[in-house]
Amino acid sequence: MVTPEPSPPLDLTAPWPGVGGAPREIDIALTGRCNLRCRYCFYADEMTALSDLPTERWLRFFEEAGELAVQRVCLSGGEVFTRPDLFTLIDGIIANRMRYSILTNGTLITEQVIEQFAVGKRRLRLDSIQVSIDGSCAAVHDRSRPPASFERALRGLRLLKASDFPVTVRVTINRHNVDDLEAIAQLLLEDVGLPGFSTNEAEQMGTARCYGQDVILTEAERQRAMDTLTRLNERYGGRIGASAGPLARARIFQEIEQRLARGEPGMPGGGTLSSCNGVFTRMAVLHDGTMVPCNMLPSLTMGVIGVNRLKDVWRSHPAINVVRARRYVPLEALPECANCPYISFCVGGCPAAVMARTGHIIGRDELICYRLYVSQRV
Amino acid sequence: MSALRYYQANPIVSCRDEGADGAILFDPDRDETAILNPSGRVLWALLSEPRTVEELAAYLVAHYEGVTLEQAQQDVRAFLEALGDGFVNEVAAGGDA
């Protein structure tokens, strides 16, 4: 955990104090290719605009990351299993003393792919493989994806589960599945038998900018999802997770209400834009090699792998330092937060969500604004 | 056959420096980490080659003021024990396990 400095560094091009020589984790989009075209893919704009790096460039980058003792990489895309050299790249990660995880739509997982993981340390070093499932049936899941996606994704998920992989599922809540959550939980936790799954929410990014009216939740739907997921999570003993989206929102607001009920003056880090902590331990690389603070902040470019040194970018690039510096911005300085009675309970929310909605990195995420929520409570 | 026991850092373990605070070891096979204080970081660097407790202790005595050989040997043994197998392995004098 990084302890905030007592005062902000004045020079955003200087090494940020206390972040170490490299990120602990790097999110890597290995490819812009995908066999699906989902209606809320946050990465869609980058997929069409950028080209994939060749194998050798990635392998050299893994060497650089390994030398700096980066511990983990998370591989995504696009769809990682469209890369014919995927296992060569995974072996490069392993050779450089790192662990890895994979985000996939699951539709290209076959028995042959499962067998590939048996080679060397590919299974040993795999932290998790996350499959996207957005409905309990084809009628729901495939509303946001090409036809037959559900059957193929579910088949891939079952194959991974049957082979005892560390498989997880992410459910992206959207307008098509908001009333299917109970059936989704039943499918994943009872039928497939996963230990748990996580949730988030379709954001106004990528293809969702075009199809927003079809997929982005209304406030009433979001609140319905909050209630449903909270109830389901109680029923299933806390097996539903969330770091964003309706369930995370419900937890944040619940905590605020509990602290208010106890008469507490605020919460740790409250009163400033102190979220998110991600930029102190991790960063991202797009599939053309562009380094960015987060894969949901693709416009904050910090150079290119193999051209700019990872260590320099991580410690000193103003694009990541400006996100780190958000924690010194008092919420009371933001016009939208003026006179808010809950200001000391708020940490500002996701910088990428703010950026997507406003074009600015400094601002509060309206979806985690408790005052707004109270005023709109259905 | 030598009675001395040699120790060496597991080459699969990575070490990331965390400024003046020391360093973090990471064993990617076991998914385990260990935190080193600054003097532990010094010992870790020495363990890139096979070393005995006596060699490591002698280094500490030579470079840290006021440390006795007996205390240094105790500290080195405690350090090796705390890290345990996986991070540091007992090896033959030539470096083979």
Image (cartoon, helix red, strand yellow):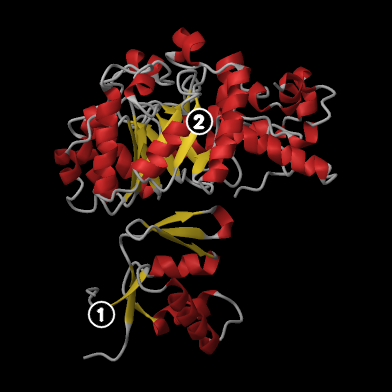
Residue at disc 1, secondary structure: loop
Task: Please indicate whether residue A209 sits to the left or right of residue B55 in the image.
Answer: right
Q: Which residue is mark 2?
A: A200
Residue A145, compared with residue B21, is above or below; it is above
Of labels 2 and 1, the one closer to you:
2
Of residues A124 and A9, the one nearer the viewer is A124
Under mark 1, the amino acid is Ala
Quarter of image, res A273: top right
Of residues A282 and A100, the one nearer the viewer is A100
* x and y percentages locating residue A91 in the rendered image: 23, 45
* x and y percentages locating residue A316 in the rendered image: 54, 35
Q: Are marks 2 and 1 on the same chain?
A: no
* x and y percentages locating residue B95 in the rendered image: 24, 73
Under mark 2, the amino acid is Asn
- Image point 66% across, 28% down: which residue? A368
The answer for which chain carries disc 2 is A
Q: CA distance from mark 2 to mark 1?
A: 54 Å
Other-residue count near label 1 (Cα within 10 Å), few / some / many at <14 / 14–19 / ≥20: some
* x and y percentages locating residue A183 in the rendered image: 43, 32
What label sits on residue A115 in the rendered view? Answer: none
Of residues A294 and A165, the one nearer the viewer is A165
